[in-house]
Image (tube, rainbow, N blue to C red):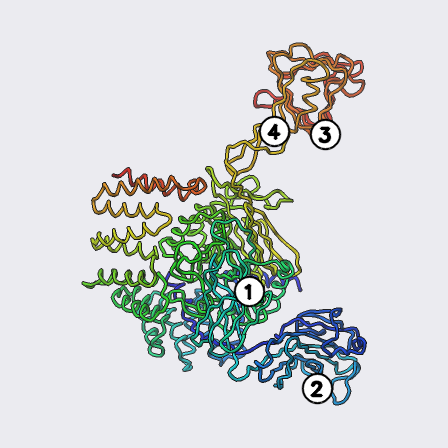
Amino acid sequence: MIMLALHLLFGVVFLFPHGDLDLRIAEISQQIKTHPDSLPLYMIRGELYIQHEEYPKAKADFQTCLKNNYRNSRVLMGLGITYLFENLPDSSLYYVNEALLLEPDNTSALELKAKAYLQASRYCEAADAFQKILDKADHPAPLLFIETSAAYMQCDDAENLHSSISVLQTGLEKLPDNRVLQNQLIMQYRHAFMFDKALTLHASIIQKAEFKIRPYMERAVTYMEMGQYGNAKKDLQTALVEWETLPPRKKDLEAMKGLKEMIIYHLSTL
Amino acid sequence: MIKSNIILSYFAFLSVHASFAQLVPNNSVWHYYDLAQAPPDQSGVTWKQNTYDHSAWSSGPAQLGYGDGDEATVIGDTTLTGYFRQAFIVNDPGDYSGLDLQLTYDDGAVVYLNGEEVWRVNMPPGVIEYSTFASSTSPENAQASISLGNTLLNGTNLVAVEMHQRSASSSDISFALSITGVPAGGVALATRGPYLQSANDSSVIVRWRTNIPTQSILDYGLSTTSLTNSVSDTVLKTEHIINVSSLTPATQYFYQVRNTTDTIIFPATDIYFKTYPVPGNNTPLTAWILGDCGTANNNARSVRDAFYNYIGSQHTDMILFLGDNAYNDGTDAEYQTAIFQNMYEQKLKNTISWSCLGNHDGHSANSNTQTGPYYDIFSFPTAGQCGGEPSGTEAYYSFDFGNIHFIVLDSYETDRSVTGPMHMWCEDDLEGINADWIVALWHHPAYSKGSHNSDTETELKQMRENFLPLFESHGVDLVLSGHSHSYERTYLLNGHYGLSSTFNINTHTVGISGSGSGQVANDGPYLKAPVGPEAGDGAVYITTGSAGKTTAGPIDHPAMYYDAVVLGSCVLKINMDTLSVLFLRPSGAIDDSFVLVKDPDCVPGNACNDNDPCTINDVLDNNCYCQGTPDLRLVTSSADTGAGTLREAINDACDGDTILFTATVQDTIGLNSEISINKDLTIIADTSADIIVSGQLVTRIFHLLPGNELVLSGLTLHEGYHPSAGGAFLNEGILILDHTEFIGNMQGPNPKAWTNQNEIRIRQGNNYIRLE
């Protein structure tokens, strides 16, 4: 009997694809059985169901909270997320906006709102929501600038390109020398045919970089787009020279060999 | 990536800053006496007094007792009364206006502070002796608390407790006690830390928290009595973050913390920070790796204590927290008990700690805005100030320790795609480094069949599919993760990005020993080539998420050399060309270990010595394994014995060798005694050379011993003789005959070529035409 019980127990555990998340849901469900009127428990279980990707169950728990007048930003956000995952951005926006009425400065709610607008292809409103987060955040991560910039780019607005670039410029003021943002900004400059600004940024990257091979190659690509093939060739050749100065152990790495092949490929197109 | 970005960020928990000065933590270690009598006096000194020597008593963490099954330390169950003592140090008693005591008891207790009785709980009045019973039966793990005046001494204080049964037939005793100092009005006390962050070769960040807003002043110097330098911030605050800069590399500095009126953390030999070595320098590293440690319970403490016992007084260069540092939601209050209070504070004040974000930390954190307790508590480099490329975020970052580069990723909340900023940053970072070793860490393991499944769970799959090709192409050596609450350690892998069912030990491991243990005493360390066509190939992946709890799982991933669902932590050491990791159980047992060697002098194709006398032309292969080819043995003489003879060639040959005949052998090789063969050999004669080996009708020619294989090709065995088991050959092994002739051989008076006691195959070309 004991062996059978152990077998069943382990069988159940092994079926759990989400480890301790399953155990936590089981634990909260047990507490709900004991205290069926404790609405915070439904809210917590709803949040766990979201992580477990069981959206109908999550929604049911949050709705139980609302039906019983347990209404706070966590419950409303939970519903907002659930509807978003079910590709229902309008419903998601309804609940997120309700949450924002309770907590206007909740950046997580603003982030959810921006995502819902993106899902609804309402890019200008998404950009506005992202911009509000950027305005409120003391330490925004690079991704936030990139997402905001991308939303502006898709926004059907005369100023979209300018706004998209402006966000990235602001990002670089807050996070100087961040290569990811720099590269993103160069792409936008190229898109806007602002090649002089792109080249200035390239030069700054090259000057500060200890590892200059990729920066030279990337500037060459910009030169190629500008039709300045001589400069492009010069940069690619410089990149190759830089590559040759690498220590042997670095040269022999697959990634470095791949980089060299890429430079040679670009040279072959000139 | 919408999903993960959102899930994690909306659990908006308020951070609660505990205000306390825990003098005796609830789960602290006590000395105890349980020998069914009162502790004997020592020259008139009773067990309650400060000068009593309790060093011979047993010790263990609270809760102590017996009979309930919930004790962290079980004491002898025959005693009616348990006696407990603990010394604690107070540097400035004037900091406290009073004391709060919280007692767990069963059945009755008397508490003494510095020799004086201060509290009696459920005990009768009058003199208390060993045989005095409690006034009544208490509930299980009964709780009581009291507030007392401050009777603390400057320096060492002693709390002593006796816990009594209700009757001789009572079945259990339970005891735990905490003492918290109540800060005097206006007195600043440290309620968290100090702890050390973001070190490099010239700076370090020291952090601590106080109960009230106050100035931040840190004095430091090369000895505890010479704290000649200071860094200060006069802004009043409770969260103190001091960046100490312009330091000398790899140097130990002692420090103290104070405000303008009072010392808050006094200098001591274990209050120090040590700067990191200059990037590129070969400096030995010791790192303690804690995965999913955030349970704030005795499981975590037992794992901790095992490491403390293991490391002793040696310095630890870093603690690597692999995420899920504080259950269930990574709140500030949870961090307090899981990390800072009665947990790792002994190490945190002199060891640099680093962390990646776990999913439970992520419940209350937002990586996009870098807000929430996780981001508030830690100070990680975002501008490349500790080495590597500026990431712009504490969610993912890198740092150097000498010639070792560490990369920390956020596998939970940040975009894991190859076009995402984390991947792009990672590529830039990897391209720009020139370290001898690369160690990466993130929470969700690329390979696991523990309580989480890397075949089915999104985060785990994406990290494996998107990041491993990048890391492997840059020669990463070691990847550390948690999440599954078990220990799982791979072989030396390369190129496996698919499901566990597609793992092939022959194609996804690197080098001769890559599919082995990696253990020197077993089948040898793992080897990596620093240069050559397979430069950088091979990494070991460790899932070690059992520093706080275990959760069952199948643990049957085929890429694992070793796995177990047991509590423990890992210790990483790197010195020069050798990296080693061991997995340490709470018992102190080392369940698993491996060594990875990357010899900087290895150039594939260069000559080497494999220390095998049986091989020649030893060269380093593409994975830096020294390998020779089996030597060819040449017979140059037709004599029976001596140099160049067949007998000597067979004697000198190694297992697997091939013996050939030179053109100088033209006469019949006449033997006067049999040749025994106890190794696998191939003896080949050119049929046109007509090589004849003769027993001269006086001896059998060959005796192949059991367990060996002999191939004879192109020979003629002639006039072998044995009276009962012959004539030319006695075979007890596997004999393969290829164009071999037997002529004139005799067993006793009868013609007979061989006596076979095992297996003989007669081969023609690639086929066997006869088996016997």
Contact? badges 2 and 1 (CB < 8 Å): no
Residue under label 3: B706
* Rendered position, B692 above or below B368: above
Query: Relative to the observer, which residue lies in front, B238 or B289?
Result: B238
- Label 4, secondary structure: give it: strand
**Residue drawn at point x = 71 percent, y = 70 percent:** B74
Contact? badges 4 and 1 (CB < 8 Å): no
Residue under label 1: B254
Mark 2 residue type: Asn
Mark 3 residue type: Pro
Sequence-wise, the earlier of marks 3 and 4 is: 4
Mark 1 residue type: Phe
Q: Closer to us: mark 3 or mark 2?
A: 2
Mark 4 residue type: Thr
Sequence-wise, the earlier of marks 4 and 1 is: 1
Between the C-alphas of marks 3 and 2, the distance is 81 Å
Q: Judge from the rendering whether residue B504 lies leftward or rightward of residue B649; answer left or right.
A: left
Q: Is residue A42 at all visible to an observer of this figure?
A: no
Same chain, marks 4 and 1? yes
Residue under label 2: B122
Which residue in the rendered view is the most extreme toward the top?
A: B667
* Rendered position, B152 above or below B241: below
Between the C-alphas of marks 4 and 1, the distance is 57 Å
Sequence-wise, the earlier of marks 1 and 3 is: 1
